[in-house]
Structure formats: structure tokens, C-alpha cells
Amino acid sequence: MSAFNEANIALVWSEALRITNEWFEQLDAVGPEISVDLLPPMGQITLLIIASAGFGGRVSWIADPMVAPPPGHKLTFRSAFMDSVHNVFFRILTPGWFYRLSSLITVPYLSSRALRTQLAFDELRTHMLDLVASARAETMSGDYEGKLGTALLRNLVEANMNQDGASKKLSEGELLSNVFLFFLAGHETTAHSLCFALVLLALYPDCQRKVYEEVARIWSSDVPVARLATNHKEYMDKLEYTTACIRESLRMFPPVTRLPKDVHADAVLPGTYFTPGSEGTPVNTGKFLMTVPEGSLVVIDIWGLHHNSLYWGEDVTKYKPERFIDTESYKWPRNAFMPFMAGPRSCIGQRFALAELVAIIASIIRRYEIRVPDVLAKEPLEVQKEALLKGTVGLTLTPANTWVKLCRRV
């Protein structure tokens, strides 16, 4: 079963435009030019979209931080989730007994953080149980009308309620773990990908200009956001260059750089070897076969694949969105592009993510010109790239510096 049908993707599109436009209202209150660290607002936007379009928890950028937690809760859902995400490694690395000890004995810094982390995860679990209970009631009654945003959660709940045998049934713990994983993957990876894509457009103003011209052709400045949200398929097809910029950013900075896989049966894998030539062009190429026995661990090097000149050419290190636009004589290599993995176990949310990325970036470029920070404006491109394209590898590839300058278009 597909997690998202066309109606669900349409909801992703409309929610992305609605929530991004709410962010614009905050920016407009500051002035026509503003320096922004992109990571926090992109994280907020993508969290609100996955909550609304994936789990039916529609909230407002403006109103939600100001409301009190619902009855029975100490934190709002957004506060609980963001605190949990920020402390996920602390949670993993800290033994359970320390959380109990922290309620009795104060260890400077660590105890207060442990208590905040425990509260966030406890509250997040309670919020998720509320969502699951609501989705379970809808599933049992068949009352789905007008509730497209619960599609992903409803699929998980149906798997939890599966009566075809215990081996196919999600346990309650697995259900909650999957809900948390989808929230984490559905907002964090997309937020990081947005940051890299927008920073690259700031670094390459000619490419940004092409995106703006493409967006302006189909979204004139006087068309209200509500109208733009009504026909995602028409706009997605027309935003070809914008989509190419996103794919090129995902090629250069894939959310997950390496992915381990267990081998459950003996296999023979075909391979190609080559030597990089002086100009980056592969030479001395040849084919080989590799035997992979059952029980092995295979690590798919997505970063290496995306930067392999055998598939992407000798200019593989350059930002070149045109490489993702098909022509009569060229088709971009689908099998060498794996930001969402590939095959039957590829990410079920890739259509969700791509629609979200296109809608947000098109909306931002329509409204603002993105520039590098003033402190870097007079530096050579290589210096700007060195400062703005650093990343750290954790659960996902995280951008280290996402400061840009936004200038409102007249």
C-alpha cells in the first residue's frame, strides 16, 4: 500500500505553501532585508508539514508557540518533539539509572538536561499515543472523510491492528517507534536538504535567477497563495529547473551518506572498476563480479555514488542543475541517484519530500532574493563555499553554517 496518494500529496503542497507564507509574515515584520540562520525556520516548517499532512496534527506557525499545552500535558506537541530531537543522542548515550538519579541528586548541567530530556520524551510519547488512539478510532469506524492528513499514521495503525499473524503485526512499541522515526526523518532530513539547496542558490545567483524566472512565469506576483495551492500536479510539472536544482543539491549533499544493509542470502554482485584520469574522466574501466556471502554487512556508499565521475561526468564536483534535465540525447542516470535509496525498500516518503521541497523553495524564491551573508559578500566563490557548505555527519548530514541574507523582491 502506498503511504500517500495524489490527494495526500496535494495536501502536502498546500500545507507547505500555507506554513511558509506564515513564516513570511514574521519576516515582513522585521523589514525588507534580514539576515537569517535557515536551519531553525526550515526545521519548524518541515515539522509543521509532517505533523499536518502526515499525521493530521494541523497547527499554525504563529499561534502554536503561544498556546498552553492541552489538558493532561506539560508541553505542547511541538515543544516535546523539538526537545526530543535536540536531545536524542543524549538520550541514547545516557544510562537509564542516571535519569532516576537526577531526580534525587543534582549533577551540574547534566541533571537538568537529563530531567528536560526525560520530560520531553515522556510528553512526546503521550502526544503520540493520543494521535494513535484517534487514528485507531477512525480506522475501526472507517471515518476517513476530510482527514487526508492522517494517511501515514493510519497505515501504521492498520499494521498494528493486522490480524494476519503476529509476524506481520506491529507491536505497540514498534508502532510508537515508527511514528517517532517518521516524524524525525520527515522533518529533519527535509530541513537539512532545504538549507543546502537554498545556500547553493545563494552561492550561484545565475541559477537562482533561472529559478525565479521559471517561478515568475507560472506564479505571477499578484496571484494569492490560496490559488497556488490548488493544483500541485500542474505546477510540479512546470517547475522543471527548480526540481533540477533540488536534485542536484541532494546529489551533492545526500541526507544519509552511507547506509548499512544485512545480507540474508548468498549473492553475486556485478561491479565496474576504473581509474580517474587527469581530467577526472574514468579510464581503464572494466567489469567484475563480487561474491557476497549470507551474513555479510554491506555498506552502500551513497556519497561516493553521487560523486562518481563514471556516472556524473568529469565535472562531478560542480553544482550543475542542468545535469538533471533530460534531453533527446541525454537521460540523467536514475540508478546512480539514491538520496531516498532505491528499489522496493526505498523511502516511502520521497514523493512527500519532493513536493514539499519544490513548494517551499519556489515560494521562497518568488518572495525573496537569497544572498550570501554580508561578511562573505566580497570574498571569492571558493571562500564562500568553504564557509557555507560544511556539514557534520550524525543521524543525517547536517549543515554547519546556514546564515544567508534575504532581500524582499519589489
Image (spheres, grey):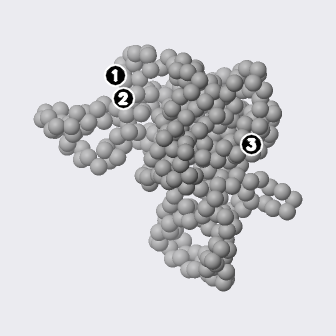
Q: Nearer the viewer, residue 290 or 361?
A: 361
Query: Could you give the CA–CA distance between mark 3 and mark 1, rounded to whole angstroms?
Result: 47 Å
Local crowd size for mark 1, using a 10 Å CA cut-off: few (<14), some (14–19), many (≥20): some
The residue shown at (55%, 55%) is: 382
Dot 2 and dot 1 residues touching (CB under 8 Å) = yes
Circle 1 SS class: loop
The residue shown at (59%, 38%) is: 371
Q: Amino acid at mark 2?
A: Glu
Sequence order check, earlier mark of 3 and 1: 1
Identify the residue position indicated by label 1 in the image: 74
Q: Is residue 326 left or right of residue 130?
A: right
Q: Amino acid at mark 1?
A: Lys
Extreme-front residue of the structure: 378
Q: Is residue 119 visible?
A: yes
Query: The N terminus lies in which quarter of the figure?
Result: top right
* Residue 51 position within the rendered picture, expressed as x and y whole percent measured from the top left: 53, 30
Circle 2 SS class: helix
* Residue 197 position within the rendered picture, expressed as x and y whole percent measured from the top left: 60, 45
Q: Is residue 350 visible?
A: no
Q: Nearer the viewer, residue 337 or 371?
A: 371
Q: Is residue 257 left or right of residue 282?
A: left
Between label 3 and label 2, give the one nearer the viewer.
3
The residue shown at (45%, 47%) is: 400
Query: Could you give the CA–CA distance between mark 3 and mark 2, rounded to whole angstroms?
Result: 45 Å
The residue shown at (38%, 39%) is: 86
Identify the residue position indicated by label 3 in the image: 210
Query: The C terminus lies in which quarter of the figure?
Result: top right
Q: Amino acid at mark 3?
A: Lys
Between label 3 and label 1, give the one nearer the viewer.
3
Dot 3 and dot 1 residues touching (CB under 8 Å) = no
Dot 3 and dot 2 residues touching (CB under 8 Å) = no
Q: Which mark is residue 123?
A: 2
